Image (cartoon, rainbow, N blue to C red):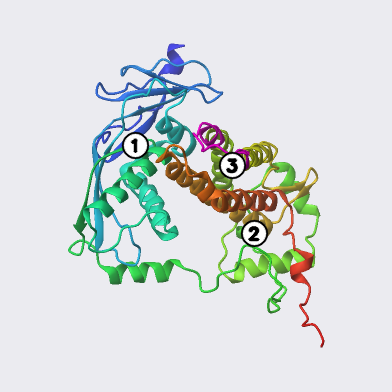
Amino acid sequence: MGLFKRFRKPAAEISGLGRSLIAARLDEADSAPADSTVVVFNPAGHARRAEAGRVVRNEGDTVYCFHPGPYQVDLTPFAAAPEIGLRLRFLIDAANPRVAQQRFDLFLFSEAEAELSLSGFCAAVQGALQGELARGALDLPPCTSLDEWNEFRAGLNQLLYTRFGVTVDDCVPVDLGDTIDFADILRARAAASPAIALPVAASPVVAPPVPQVAVPPAAVTPMSAAAESFTAVAEPSAAAISHASLYAATGQAVADVAADAKALRRLFLELPVLSGALRLLVLPDGVEIFKSHQAVLRRLSLLALEVNTMPSLAWAAPDQPLESAQQSRRCAHSAAAISALDEGWALLSRLQLESPAPWAGHEDDTDRICANLEYHLSQRRAARAQVDTEDSQERKEPKL
């Protein structure tokens, strides 16, 4: 055994823990700093917190250590005005004994990889804040009064605790004009955006014809050995080549297997937790509210089953590998499903602010979120884009 220990990989780099690094994954040979907290996940995903020190884990366990903070970041609430910022100071509280799993522990297991950097976490928080402001769920008007600011702070505190499991310690407006150049931001956005954007869903608009060219080998997503041997003898159809060429001509990226797997992992882990949190809401009395609430829970349960039985990205059937263009389409729908999931967490934070929860005022939001999840997961399951026959037919005006 000593011979194998000599070739053990180096210890995890956690020198920035508490400053530029919030959490990091540990191996058996690593030791957690004295001022950090250790979270151990078993293969089933159940978490337990342990004391700092040398990590002792069982087979199949995943171990993280995190520093509770506090941390300070500058956020941009409005993308169109990056010089107006919010200086946010947050921390990770101790474990709440009244819940089975801490929300930050679920965030680590579901979204963090080898490490959780402060800059990456700041980008996720900023995206959630900008999304809520764009939807009108949070209001931050200019010349904010004290009551408006307190209402915004309450919504922000609940959003960050529900979505990420962190507690806001302080939040103040700040002028970022001296540190941010809006012209550079606009140039970066223009360079990053493609020249032509294709819609994700199918539309009745006929695309212009594209030349029939072969797909370059570099644009093909790596698959298993069996799939590679199959594609070596099977020639793709003309329609498949045309569709793949259209994606390549407009700068559409090829399928990202890692991003799709991460999206499905998040849906697998978080949909049951979101459904359970919605089930625990205290609702007003009324038969109609009860029926609407139960219908949403039923749809979320079916969506969790849909995720659990989702087919592999690279295969249309057990003996039919999927071309890269269709894999890109599937990845786009899995990413869109994640956006709907994040919106569901944001809606849960708004419902938890009041007791009883104002369910009747958010029935349209719950129905829209469930419908988006159902649509994008069904498109992720389909090997080809599903076209609505009613919408694709030519519309004719009635004759008088």
Disc on the earlier residue, 1 or 2 = 1
Residue 275: give x, y in percent of width and height: 56, 36
* Label 1 crowd bin: few (<14), some (14–19), many (20+), radius 10 Å: some
Image position of 339 with respect to 292: above or below: below
Tell me the residue that label 3 is attached to. Answer: 289
Image position of 83 with respect to 72: above or below: below
Range of magenta residues: 274-290
Image-based side of 397 in relation to 91, left or right = right
- Pick the residue in front: 227 or 330: 330
* Label 3 crowd bin: few (<14), some (14–19), many (20+), radius 10 Å: some
Disc on the earlier residue, 2 or 3 = 2
Amino acid at circle 3 = Ile
As drawn, the label of residue 246 is none
Residue 365: give x, y in percent of width and height: 54, 52
Q: CA distance from mark 1 to mark 3?
A: 31 Å
Q: Which residue: 25% across, 52% down?
A: 147
Q: Which residue: 58% across, 71% down?
A: 250
Amino acid at circle 1 = Val
Tell me the residue that label 1 is attached to. Answer: 166
Amino acid at circle 2 = Pro
Of labels 2 and 3, the one closer to you: 3
Q: Which residue: 80% across, 45% down?
A: 319
Image-based side of 9 in relation to 241, left or right = left
Q: Are marks 1 and 2 in contact (CB under 8 Å)?
A: no
Residue 226: give x, y in percent of width and height: 74, 42
